[in-house]
Image (cartoon, grey):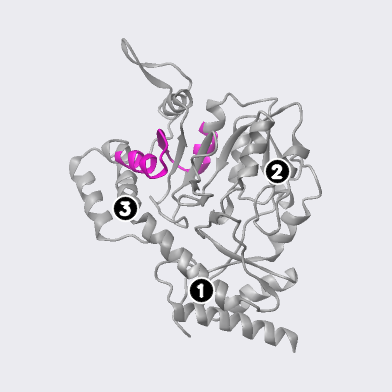
């Protein structure tokens, strides 16, 4: 059997080990100077005023909602086609997520879905820039026109941009993930970014038990919690930020080669890139024109030592969300849930391996037709 081709491999090396070693030698392991340096690097890269590190993108979303005062009686519009964390953050604050459909080509929420779902209790929208595909400018504009807060779930999208504007600069609050499947990683971890000083101060307080500096010193002003990132993770992030653009460019190049290899192949629809967008391909997810073939194709590739994954979930089909309010039939979300396949994409992936993967896909489709 050929060597296994992994779905994802994080790019970490000696530089990360060296800086982690410095943290361990310092004896200061909780949130400290390396986390601060990581926050500064993310803020500088994006061109935003404030970046606040957290334990995960999920807790970042929770803090963003919390800072806005969203809670019981409020509704938040989210795409049905997303990882459960998007909805769970809303539920954690006592608010109600409202599920809407997505565009079948971009996999992202649409302005029309937001307009249709907006009701008297709607306070915010959490659009997801899924797989590294940036949101259209119209989504931000629509939310602004409707008077709704925008908390972007950009778990997959650090480095993405639309019309030259980076993801993280257009929403009121944007949340990123540094899980090992993301473009850069701190093992686990997240970040909230904003240009709003009041919101930044509130989030920084809430994640540190409610502590805030006053004239008389530090005091517990809010009822907060502990969502602090450790300095070990911060050290990882500092070095990873130095690698970010090289990693993104490599992923874009390899995604482009997939597009070339899959072009014209009947039965497979490669991902589309939004006009004027910089898609960073955290996930390279293509769609089978016949959804019933997706799982057999995954099994076929697994037998050839090629690791794949589904795209993500249609929340309304999951037991935990059966009673979650929804608007529309969510047919695109359901279609994508059953038909998307995520192919390997990472720094170790070679052009020869990409050719091997696509050759196996062609073999499967050829055998399926006989």
> In the displayed image of the protein, which residue is found farthest to the bottom?
370
Compared across the picture, whether 106 is left or right of 204 comes to: right
Q: Residues within 10 Å of mark 2 (few under 14, many from 20)?
A: some
What residue lies at 49% left-to-right and 42% top-to-bottom? Answer: 168
Disc 3 element: helix
The magenta region covers 37-63
Of pointers 3 and 2, the one earlier in the residue sequence: 2
User: Could you say where residue 339 lies in the image, as x and y percent from the top left?
Assistant: 69, 65
User: Could you say where residue 127 lies in the image, as x and y percent from the top left?
Assistant: 62, 43
> Where does label 2 land, which residue?
111
Q: Residues within 10 Å of mark 3 (few under 14, many from 20)?
A: few
Disc 1 element: helix
Of pointers 1 and 2, the one earlier in the residue sequence: 2
Prevailing secondary structure class for the magenta stretch in the rendered image: helix
- Residue 233 falls within the magenta-colored stretch: no
> Where does label 1 land, which residue?
257
> In the displayed image of the protein, which residue is found farthest to the left?
25
User: Could you say where residue 46 lies in the image, as x and y percent from the top left?
Assistant: 42, 43
Question: In front: 265, or 162?
Answer: 162
Compared across the picture, whether 261 is left or right of 79 comes to: left
Residue 87 seen by the camera: no
Question: In front: 229, or 44?
Answer: 44
User: Could you say where residue 57 lies in the image, as x and y percent from the top left?
Assistant: 50, 43
> Where does label 3 land, which residue?
242
């Amino acid at each position: 059997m050929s060597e296994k081709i992994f779905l994802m491999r994080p790019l970490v090396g000696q530089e990360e080990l060296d800086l982690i070693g410095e943290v361990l030698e310092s004896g200061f392991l909780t949130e400290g100077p390396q986390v601060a340096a990581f926050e500064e690097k993310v803020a500088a890269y994006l061109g935003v005023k404030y970046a606040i590190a957290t334990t995960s993108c999920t807790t970042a979303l929770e803090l963003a909602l919390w800072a806005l005062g969203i809670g019981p009686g409020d509704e938040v519009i989210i795409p049905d086609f997303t990882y459960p964390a998007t909805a769970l953050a809303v539920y954690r604050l006592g608010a109600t997520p409202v599920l809407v459909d997505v565009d079948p080509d971009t996999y992202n929420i649409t302005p029309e879905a937001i307009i249709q779902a907006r009701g008297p209790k709607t306070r915010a929208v959490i659009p997801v820039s899924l797989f590294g595909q940036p949101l259209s400018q119209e989504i931000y504009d629509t939310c602004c026109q409707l008077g709704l807060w925008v908390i972007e779930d950009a778990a997959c999208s650090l480095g993405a941009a639309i019309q030259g504007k980076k993801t993280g600069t257009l929403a009121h609050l944007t949340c990123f993930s540094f899980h090992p499947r993301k473009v850069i990683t701190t093992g686990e971890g997240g970040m909230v970014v904003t240009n709003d000083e009041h919101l930044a101060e509130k989030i920084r307080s809430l994640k540190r038990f409610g502590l805030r500096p006053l004239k008389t010193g530090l005091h517990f002003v809010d009822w907060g919690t502990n969502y602090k990132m450790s300095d070990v993770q911060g050290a990882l992030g500092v070095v990873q930020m130095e690698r970010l653009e090289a990693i993104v460019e490599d992923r874009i190049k390899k995604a482009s080669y997939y597009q070339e290899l899959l072009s014209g192949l009947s039965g497979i629809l490669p991902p589309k890139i939004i006009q004027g967008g910089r898609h960073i391909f955290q996930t390279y997810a293509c769609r089978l024109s016949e959804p019933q073939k997706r799982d057999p194709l995954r099994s076929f590739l697994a037998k050839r030592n090629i690791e794949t994954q589904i795209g993500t979930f249609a929340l309304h089909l999951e037991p935990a969300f059966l009673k979650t309010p929804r608007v529309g039939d969510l047919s695109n979300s359901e279609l994508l849930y059953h038909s998307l396949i995520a192919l390997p994409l990472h720094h170790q992936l070679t052009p020869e391996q990409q050719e091997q993967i696509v050759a196996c896909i062609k073999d499967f489709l050829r055998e399926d037709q006989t």
